[in-house]
């Protein structure tokens, strides 16, 4: 078949016969013969997608959209091609366009929710997965992803509703109890959260992370003796749990045992160098021991890990003041004032929350 004789009908016939490679070549020839034929580029994308050549398909779909952005179905196909490549962020815009063109499309809604979830845009994921889950009520995996999206976007009421529904479907899922506990913690219900973690541990006593989660809840509510037992139980399962070591170090510091605390915190930072609390506590202990250079190093790391928290800036300012670095100290204290002002402004805009 000569290139100049290839028509769209030829390409379609090859596609219908399942000759995808030949069909793709035929569509390429059609696009070369008429570079303004948006439909031909769209059809090329379809064949390439069937061949699972998603990167090439996405390029063909984008060319079709550039020529005619109102061509039906192409935005959805582009979003799907990007989704198949796990290019979740790239999938979002075409899927939004597809949904705008057809607001009742379950496929566009679901794919958009899944893409937002994959891109860690959990608030948007909760919106679109919520719409999809309202249609597909019995899809447990969809409801689990919706519940996690609600939890990670701090929509705790939504998360609880979903996790409780999942508990009815599978009451023996330790993960559902764990996530329910996290949602209850977010709602400021620590005792109920602890009860859920205890249920999770009954179902999966050796599961890494569960004892730490329980210990964190005990730590948060100042039940330090119970927290220590939970963190030690976590270390018995996972001796390299830097989080458990950090919180044991924090409790040792609170119990005025700085040497024990420092040993635990140093071990934690050797295992994992991005736990802010470990560096913050180390800095505080080292200041008390007048080991100022080491304290500055630790507190600078705490600031680096989260510059929005005023406590590390304040403690760093104190060390600079103690060591005669007044300009550096004032810079840190100014940052503390700035962060406090932002916090006050936000509180003022939102209105003070009622006392618990």
Image: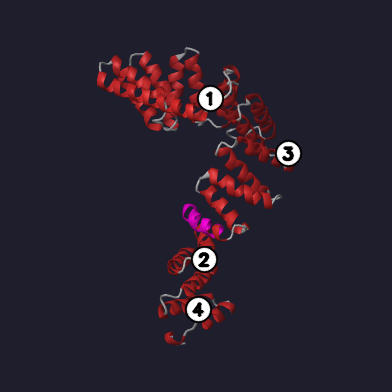
Q: Give the crowd class for mark 4: few <14, some 14-19, many >=20 residues within 10 Å.
A: some
Residue 60 visible in the picture: yes
Which colour style is shown?
secondary structure
Tell me the number on the disc at residue 22.
4
Q: Earlier in the sequence, mark 3 or mark 4?
A: 4
What whole-number distance in Å separates the C-alpha atoms at marks 2 and 4?
Answer: 22 Å
Q: Give the crowd class for mark 1: few <14, some 14-19, many >=20 residues within 10 Å.
A: few
Magenta stretch, main secondary structure class:
helix
What whole-number distance in Å separates the C-alpha atoms at marks 3 and 4?
Answer: 53 Å
On the image, numbered disc 2 is attached to which residue? 74
Tell me the number on the disc at residue 171.
3
The stretch in magenta equals 85-99
Q: Earlier in the sequence, mark 2 or mark 4?
A: 4
Q: Earlier in the sequence, mark 2 or mark 3?
A: 2
On the image, numbered disc 1 is attached to which residue? 352
Residue shown at 35% from the left, 27% from the top:
300
Query: Secondary structure under badge 4?
Result: helix
């Amino acid at each position: 078949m000569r290139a100049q004789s290839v028509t769209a009908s030829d390409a379609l016939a090859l596609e219908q016969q399942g000759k995808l490679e030949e069909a793709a070549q035929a569509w390429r020839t059609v696009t070369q013969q008429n570079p303004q034929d948006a439909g031909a580029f769209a059809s090329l994308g379809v064949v390439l997608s069937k061949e699972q050549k998603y990167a090439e398909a996405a390029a063909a779909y984008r060319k079709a959209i550039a020529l005619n952005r109102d061509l039906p179905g192409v935005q959805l196909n582009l979003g799907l091609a990007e989704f198949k490549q796990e290019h979740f962020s790239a999938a979002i815009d075409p899927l939004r366009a597809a949904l705008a063109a057809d607001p009742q499309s379950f496929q566009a809604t679901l794919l958009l929710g899944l893409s937002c979830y994959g891109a860690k845009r959990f608030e948007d994921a909760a919106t679109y997965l919520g719409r999809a889950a309202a249609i597909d009520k019995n899809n447990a995996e969809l409801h689990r992803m919706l519940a996690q999206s609600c939890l990670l976007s701090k929509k705790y009421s939504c998360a609880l509703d979903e996790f409780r529904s999942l508990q009815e479907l599978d009451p023996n899922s330790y993960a559902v109890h764990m996530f329910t506990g996290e949602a209850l913690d977010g709602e400021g219900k620590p005792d109920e959260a602890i009860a859920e973690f205890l249920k999770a541990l009954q179902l999966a006593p050796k599961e890494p992370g569960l004892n730490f989660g329980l210990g964190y809840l005990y730590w948060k509510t100042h039940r330090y003796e119970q927290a220590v037992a939970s963190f030690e139980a976590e270390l018995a399962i996972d001796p390299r749990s830097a989080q458990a070591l950090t919180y044991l170090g924090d409790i040792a510091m609170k119990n005025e045992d700085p040497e024990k605390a420092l040993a635990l915190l140093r071990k934690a930072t050797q295992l994992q160098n991005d736990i802010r609390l470990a560096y913050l506590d180390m800095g505080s202990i080292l200041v008390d021991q007048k080991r100022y250079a080491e304290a500055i190093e630790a507190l600078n790391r705490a600031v680096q890990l989260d510059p929005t928290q005023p406590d590390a800036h304040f403690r760093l300012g104190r060390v600079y003041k103690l060591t005669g670095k007044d300009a550096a100290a004032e810079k840190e204290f100014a940052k503390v004032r700035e962060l406090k002002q932002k916090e006050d402004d936000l509180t003022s805009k939102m209105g003070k929350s009622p006392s618990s």
